[in-house]
Image (tube, helix red, strand yellow):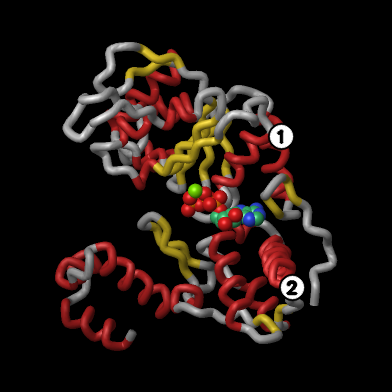
Amino acid sequence: MRPDTRLRHYRSLYGNSGAMDLLYTQIRQVARTEATVLLEGESGTGKELIAMAIHQDSPRCDANFVAVNCGAIPAALIESVLFGHEKGSFTGAGSQHTGYFEHASGGTLFLDEITEMPANMQVKLLRILECGRFHRVGGSQEIAVDVRLIAATNRSLQEAVNEGFLRQDLMYRLAVFPITVPPLRERGNDAELLAQHFLDDLNNRAGTRKQFSRRSLERIRSYHWPGNVRELKNLVHRAYILSAGAVTLHEPTDASRRPTALINGVLNFMVGTRLVDAQREIILATLKHFQGNKRKAAEILGISLKTLYNRLREY
Ligand SMILES: Nc1ncnc2c1ncn2[C@@H]1O[C@H](COP(=O)(O)OP(=O)(O)OP(=O)(O)O)[C@@H](O)[C@H]1O
Ligand SMILES: [Mg+2]
């Protein structure tokens, strides 16, 4: 069975839901401007694609789009990676190096996982946003940059500020144009349409004509998609590889069969989750949080160590 609606898209972003229409409008509105954009949304919802679409639609499209994952750069290196360094400015700085800010000059710099940027760097970033100038590490000369900034986070912005991961002044400065990216489960039947789109793409590339089994389509509709579009795309790809004819989406991991999602230390439960399932999720997530320390987990959960052992044996 094929969904009868034609799938709409805006650049590389696909989806027909009202939530996606709103997103397309916001991208169109803000792309033309110089405004700093702050994207807030769960992992795998398409934040990087949105940032790219904004760049491609902007007058800066002929210059570079540079994406940086702030969470992946060691704290000790981040200043040099972003701003560059002068020769001999620290041990190992054998030559002059230009940073991402200079690479993105005239274009767009996408700072992903902005809340993972160390606090002292957040202060420097704020300063650049205010005055458009910075120093390379070890440099005395001020360098002017013309960069449009887009930042993203998969944490809740307010929580990130409250918990000290994001400076409030920086948040206000970044969120000139905030965009909340909806999770896939809030996009009507986009999951089904996207699944078909990803399958069509795989078929086109390999010259095959594989189709979803009826059962797979039911699963796509009913599943909660905690990993959002990324999870859907990967699941379709895996099922495509494994199938000879009818593409059957299994619920391949325990995680996908579970009624919950663990995101940034918060468990989300569907209304109607069985109590035994909720209890299992809470216990396993707490244990994971304390890196497998059963004594600590039992203490926090308010159960005896013996009860914890019994539960784990059951699971
Ligand atoms: N609306 C969409 N249409 C088509 N593909 C999409 C869409 N949204 C996301 N994707 C695909 O899903 C994957 C994840 O998207 P992306 O990396 O932009 O998510 P993200 O929000 O930046 O995730 P993270 O927070 O983990 O960095 C990519 O392969 C991307 O191409
Ligand atoms: Mg991303």
| Residue under pointer 2 | 207
**Helix or strand or loop: what does disc 2 sit on?**
loop
Horizontal side, residue 18 vs residue 67: left or right: right
Q: Is residue 107 above or below residue 189?
A: above
| Residue under pointer 1 | 28
Q: Amino acid at mark 2?
A: Gly
Q: Amino acid at mark 1?
A: Arg
Please name whichever residue, 3 or 144, is drawn nearer the observer in this view of the structure: 144
**Helix or strand or loop: what does disc 1 sit on?**
helix
Q: Which picture quadrant has residue 35?
A: top right
Q: Residue at x 41, y 27 (%)?
A: 170
For the residues labelled 2 and 1, the Cα–Cα distance comes to: 35 Å
Horizontal side, residue 145 vs residue 37: left or right: left
- For the C terminus, give its image quadrant: bottom left
Q: Is residue 117 above or below residue 198?
A: above
Q: Dot 1: few (<14), some (14–19), or many (≥20) neighbours within 10 Å? A: some
